[in-house]
Image: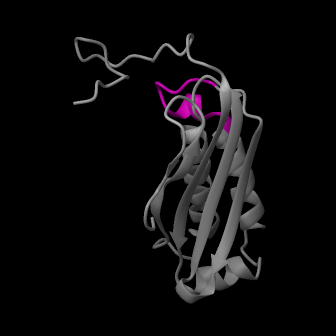
């Protein structure tokens, strides 16, 4: 069984020492989905929500949160991010917003948490922007699609989220 890196020999949570790890180019892509009812989706798509441009707010929320992932996740290292992109695609057939975040850095530890936190925050911002119209909006399927860099190299999800 693999040793858990975020627990000491006594099983207590600890922050991993990355001081001796090699600095490499890191990249992570994460995705999540937000499902809407008819009215909320229509107003979102037409940019007619009372709170304003929900897609712009969600993108900014994702970027802002991704840059602060170490403040959200207790054992996450602060990372000097080189770029963090948050894209949102509206899918009419299922009334969903598909949120994708790509984080990049040259550092000694990965940027998976930054990408995941960016997706989660963008999805939650979309809920916040549409909740006055519909409380039943659902955030689903937040997960890592791929990561590259570091000792473990490249990993890609097989199958859909």
**x and y percent of residue 49 in the render?**
72, 74
Check if residue 120 falls in the magenta segment: no
Quadrant of the drawing holding the C terminus = bottom left
Left or right side of 161 for 129: right
Check if residue 68 falls in the magenta segment: yes
Residue visible at 39% across and 16% down?
A: 14
Q: Tell which of 122 and 19 is nearer to you.
A: 19
Q: How many marks?
A: 0
**x and y percent of residue 158 in the render?**
43, 61
Magenta part of the chain: 67-78
| Color encoding of the figure | one colour
Residue visible at 60% across and 68% down?
A: 98
Left or right side of 110 for 55: right
Left or right side of 93 for 84: right
80 vs 88: above or below = above
**x and y percent of residue 47 in the render?**
77, 76
160 vs 47: above or below = above
153 vs 125: above or below = above
Quadrant of residue 39 within the rendered picture: bottom right
Quadrant of residue 1 within the rendered picture: top left
Q: Tell which of 2 and 67 is nearer to you.
A: 2
Residue visible at 71% across and 46% down?
A: 63
Left or right side of 116 for 52: right
Q: Tell which of 28 and 46 is nearer to you.
A: 28
Residue visible at 31% across and 25% down?
A: 4
């Amino acid at each position: 069984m693999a040793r858990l890196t975020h627990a000491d020999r006594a099983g207590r949570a600890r922050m991993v020492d990355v001081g001796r790890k090699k600095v490499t180019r890191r990249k992570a892509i994460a995705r999540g989905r937000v499902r809407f009812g008819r009215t909320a989706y229509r107003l979102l798509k037409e940019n007619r929500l009372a709170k304003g441009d929900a897609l712009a707010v969600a993108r900014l929320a994702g970027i802002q949160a991704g840059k602060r992932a170490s403040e959200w996740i207790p054992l996450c290292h602060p990372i000097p991010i080189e770029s963090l992109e948050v894209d949102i695609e509206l899918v009419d057939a299922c009334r969903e917003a598909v949120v994708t975040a790509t984080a990049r850095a040259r550092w000694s530890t990965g940027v998976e948490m930054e990408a995941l936190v960016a997706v989660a925050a963008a999805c939650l911002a979309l809920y916040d922007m549409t909740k006055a119209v519909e409380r039943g909006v659902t955030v689903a399927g937040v997960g890592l699609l791929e990561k590259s860099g570091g000792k473990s190299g490249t990993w890609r999800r097989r199958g859909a989220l």
